[in-house]
Amino acid sequence: MKILVIEDEIELQEAIKDSLLREKYTVETAGDFHTAYEKIALYDYDCILLDIMLPGGSGFQILEKLKEIRKSDNVIIK
């Protein structure tokens, strides 16, 4: 399972990533709106863990972008 963790707090991002890697998931991360948007535009994920407040934009804008590009990735808002 491929998971994208979108979180701007680096320590929290790393803790989530490490936990998921221990469970043998494939994990990518993004720490801001623009990096997150680039990744969702280029790749498909089984699940996206999404923070609402991000540098450069918001998690709600990421949800809108997912709709615009017709992606049906599963999203968990945290």
Image: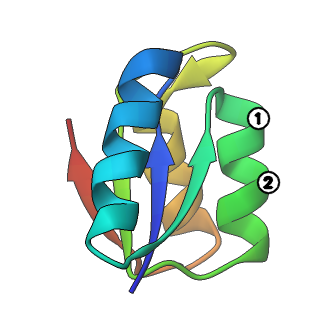
Quadrant of image for the C terminus = top left
Amino acid type of the residue tagged 2 in the rendering: Glu
Residue for badge 2 = 38
* In the depicted structure, whether residue 53 falls above or below residue 48: above
Circles 2 and 1: CB distance less than 8 Å? yes
Q: Position of residue 60 (x, y in %)?
A: 40, 35
Residue at the image point whose x is 65% and y is 31% from the top: 33
In the rendering, at what x and y percent does residue 37 appear? Answer: 70, 49
Kindly report the distance in space between the C-alpha atoms of the residues bearing marks 2 and 1.
6 Å
- Residue 34 is tagged as 1
User: Would residue 32 be found to the left or right of residue 48 on screen?
Assistant: right
Q: Secondary structure at mark 1?
A: helix
Q: Residue at x 38, y 86 (%)?
A: 1
64 relative to 72, above or below: above
Residue 18, numbered label = none
Viewer-nearest residue: 42 or 68: 42
Q: Quick one: 62 or 11, which is closer to the camera?
A: 11
